[in-house]
Image: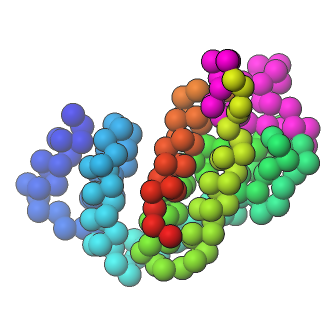
Amino acid sequence: SLAEEAELIAKAGLIESAEAPLAMARVLRSEARRARAAEALALAEKRAGTTAVLALCQQAAAFAFGWTYFYDLPHAHRGIARGGQCCRMDDYPLLYPIGPAKAMEPVLALAQVTGDPLYRKMADEMAAFLGHWQLAAPGQPWDGGMVHALGQFSGQHWGPDLAGQVDSGMATGNSLAALECWLAHPR
């Protein structure tokens, strides 16, 4: 696999940077090899310490938080927007679950590495948002799925003809994985 090839190259070159295991963690996560991804991420964090890599991670988190709601919207799914990702499109501004879902693991890692309670608080907000956006539709194939996106100003589910859609792949899979990560992460 691509991950195994990259690992051989890294070992052959005796690369000792934080960036190599960080990249490996990303590749492994995309290949759904979560245990090995967690090991690679832990190694990246250990090697980064208080280096520029950690500072860049904190800057990336600050940027992501700049696109995160800190209040609820009456038209959001179940009225919950806080902890969700906003998309400021000119034609149809949206509210998404995929941003917090993808950010959960790195934000929890920053909480652990830095000891800064802000990161844990943000992870808690994102988890609450994701939990509220999970659909309850017993007997339907989309039961337990995630709302893909909503119009920020109307609450209409975004999708073809604004009829809505459940994202059974990216949003649902990543959201459920994010909630598992949040539940497993020490407080």
Q: Is residue 162 left or right of residue 175?
A: right
Q: Is residue 50 magenta?
A: no
Q: In this view, does 167 lie above or below 14?
A: above
Q: In this view, does 30 lie to the left or right of 136?
A: left
> Residue 90, can we see it?
no
- The residue segment tinted magenta is 139-165
Q: Give the x, y percent position of residue 74.
A: 91, 48
Quadrant of residue 116 in the image?
A: bottom right
What secondary structure do most residues of the magenta stretch adopt? Answer: loop
Identity of the residue furthest to the left in this view: 12
Q: Give the x, y percent position of residue 69.
A: 76, 58
Q: Give the x, y percent position of residue 92.
A: 83, 37
Q: Which of 25 and 125 is in front in this view?
A: 125
Q: Give the x, y percent position of residue 43.
A: 27, 65
| Number of marks | 0
The structure residue drawn at horizontal position 62% and vertical position 62%, both measured from the top left corner, is 124
Q: Nearer the viewer, residue 12 or 84?
A: 84
- Tell me how the rendering is colored: rainbow
The structure residue drawn at horizontal position 49% and vertical position 44%, both measured from the top left corner, is 177
> Residue 60, can we see it?
yes
The structure residue drawn at horizontal position 77% and vertical position 25%, both measured from the top left corner, is 164
The structure residue drawn at horizontal position 24% and vertical position 42%, both measured from the top left corner, is 3
Q: Is residue 70 left or right of residue 48?
A: right
Quadrant of residue 135 in the image?
A: top right
Q: Nearer the viewer, residue 83 or 143?
A: 143
Q: Is residue 93 left or right of residue 42?
A: right
Q: Quadrant of the N terminus?
A: top left
